[in-house]
Every structure is written in structure tokens, then in C-alpha cells.
Image: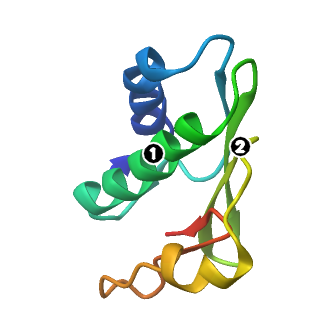
């Protein structure tokens, strides 16, 4: 079991040094206290999306991560101010299949 809110806060703190000037992380958490997930896989997904958000967002912009439970699933939504990805690239860039009932990213949304 992962104490997800504390776990996410820890990783946001760890990534703070890579923020560009004026960038900030904002976490909105409305999920359960604990989740059952593979911490290594979850870390790879979260860190990849957050580091890309930092890399492709301009200075002085907020990077948001919101977490909520939707119809029995945990929804992680990453929102940044970057230029985005072309629509034709979404199916290859934002699709992860690792054998979980549903772990994929689409338009920088992750369902875990």
C-alpha cells in the first residue's frame, strides 16, 4: 500500500530543484489515503509526466497535479502550460500498457 498524498508530496519536493524560474507545483488531492499499486511503475509514470511538464512549460507558470477518485478509479491529471503534443501523436505518446486493469495516459491524464 502507498500513502499516495504523502508519496506525491515527497516526489514534488524532490523535483523542485529542476523547476525553471518562477515555476511552481500545485497538488490538489481528493483521493483515498492509501492505494494499492506498484510504486516503481507509478513513480516512472508520475516522474516522466512531471519532468516533461517542467521541461516544456515556460518560466513563471504553474504545473498542476490533481488526484481524485472517479467511478472507483483513481484519476491523476497533469496540467501544464507547454505547447502540447500533436493530436496524431497521442496514441503512441500517451499509452502505457503494463498489465494493470487500466494504466494509461491520454492527454496527460493517468488512470491508476
Horizontal side of 21 relative to 82 (left or right) equals: left
Closer to the camera in the image, 11 or 22: 22
State which mark lies toward you, 2 or 1: 2
Estimate the spatial distance between the alpha carbons at disc 2 and disc 1, rounded to whole Å: 21 Å
Q: Is residue 28 visible to us here?
A: no
Give the residue drawn at x 40%, y 32%: 11
Instruction: Give how far across and how far down residue 13 sits, in percent.
Output: 44, 20
Identify the residue at the far top of this view. Answer: 21
- Closer to the chain start, of discs 2 and 1, is 1
Give the residue drawn at x 69%, y 21%: 59
Check disc 1 and report its element: helix, strand or loop. Answer: helix
Which residue has dot 2 on it? 80
Give the residue drawn at x 50%, y 51%: 49
Residue 27, which numbered label?
none
Does residue 84 sit above or below 47 in this rendering? below
Residue 4, which numbered label?
1
Q: Is residue 98 visible to us here?
A: yes
Q: Badge 1: few (under 14), some or many (20 or more) residues near its Cα, within 10 Å?
A: some
Check disc 2 and report its element: helix, strand or loop. Answer: loop
Does residue 107 sit above or below 56 in this rendering? below
Horizontal side of 91 relative to 61 (left or right) equals: left
Does residue 102 sit above or below 42 in this rendering? below
Image quadrant in which you'd find residue 107? bottom right
Instruction: Give how far across and how far down residue 2 sits, in percent.
Output: 34, 49
Q: Badge 2: few (under 14), some or many (20 or more) residues near its Cα, within 10 Å?
A: many
Closer to the camera in the image, 73 or 44: 44
Instruction: Give how far across and how far down residue 91 sits, in percent.
Output: 57, 85
Closer to the camera in the image, 44 or 5: 44
Horizontal side of 60 relative to 105 (left or right) equals: right
Amino acid at each position: 500500500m502507498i500513502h499516495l498524498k504523502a508519496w506525491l508530496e515527497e516526489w514534488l519536493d524532490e523535483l523542485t530543484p529542476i523547476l525553471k524560474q518562477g515555476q511552481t507545483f500545485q497538488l490538489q488531492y481528493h483521493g483515498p489515503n492509501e492505494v494499492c499499486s506498484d510504486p516503481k511503475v507509478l513513480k516512472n509514470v508520475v516522474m516522466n509526466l512531471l519532468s516533461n511538464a517542467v521541461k516544456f512549460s515556460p518560466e513563471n507558470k504553474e504545473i498542476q497535479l490533481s488526484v481524485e477518485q472517479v467511478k472507483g478509479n483513481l484519476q491523476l491529471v497533469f496540467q501544464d502550460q507547454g505547447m502540447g503534443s500533436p493530436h496524431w501523436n497521442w496514441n503512441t505518446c500517451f499509452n502505457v500498457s503494463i498489465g494493470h486493469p487500466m494504466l494509461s495516459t491520454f492527454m496527460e491524464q493517468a488512470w491508476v
